[in-house]
Image (cartoon, rainbow, N blue to C red):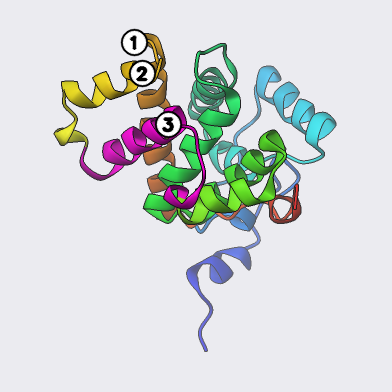
Amino acid sequence: MADTPRQQAGNAETRGKSMAGATALDVMALHLPPAEPTPAMAAYFQKCRDKIGYVPNVLTAYAHDMPKLEAFAAFYNDLMLAPSGVTKLEREMIAVVVSSENKCFYCLAAHGAAVRQLGGDPVLGELMAMNYRAADLPRRQRAMLDFAVKITRASFEIAGSDRQALRDEGFSDRDIWDIAAVASFFNMSNRMASAVDMRPNAEYHGLAR
């Protein structure tokens, strides 16, 4: 049987190590040699190693282009970690539900692990990945996830009544922006991850089980 494109590229002598310690080919199907890291990104990768013990493969995948990596990391960190009326757990729930709609292996593994960790509940993580409608969620979170799914499936159908349904559950207009921004970001990320066959770190699969 002939080698796959990933295997063929992996046999090339040009296969260089990235600053994450893994090659881009270990994490995706494209052979894109790593760029010279900026001091900020080298420090960020080291912070990942110090804090969680590894560098998320999505960062390794972006490391062939420092401006794109810096933009991705800055936007991600602002969306997922900055203060918001939408909790960090709720933002991770949105990530998983959107990724479930898009069947994105990478993001389901990575953000399913985050839901399990932040929620302290492995079952919640599985429900978000498989069918959030089967979960016994507060009305607020159900409305939030329904909105995220509608953005994913048919954003052109979003109407004032959809936004009002979120206001009725206590979300501010800024919160609605944040919900939409997280859902939109993961729709983009899911499509990129699937397009390049991005693979999640093995560590994600066993976290918080």
Amino acid at circle 1: Asp
| Residue 173 tag number | 1
Q: Which numbered disc, 3 or 2, marks the residue that appears first in the sequence? A: 3
| Left or right, 168 with reference to 3 | left
Determine the main secondary structure of the stretch shown in magenta: helix
Residue type (three-letter) at the residue carrying disc 2: Ile
Residue 31 appears anywhere in the view: no
Query: Which label sits in the foreground, 3 or 2?
Result: 3
Which residue is denoted by mark 2 in the rendering?
Answer: 176
Instruction: Give the Cα distance between marks 3 and 2.
Output: 15 Å
Q: Do the residues under discs 2 and 1 have CB atoms within 8 angstroms? A: yes
The percent coordinates of residue 189 (x first, y second) are 44, 40
Instruction: Report x, y in % for residue 18.
Output: 69, 42
Between 94 and 72, the one lying in front of the other is: 94
Magenta-highlighted residues: 132-154
Q: Neighbour class for label 2 at 10 Å: few (<14), some, many (≥20)?
A: some
- In percent of width and height, residue 24 lies at 60, 50
Tags 3 and 2 in contact by the CB under 8 Å rule? no
In whole angstroms, how far apart are the C-alphas of marks 3 and 1? 18 Å
Crowd around label 3: few <14 · some 14–19 · many ≥20 (10 Å)? few
Q: Residue placed at 15% from the left, 35% from the top?
A: 157
Q: Nearer the viewer, residue 160 or 203?
A: 160
User: Disc 3 designates what residue?
Assistant: 139
Residue 96 vs 14, above or below: the answer is: above
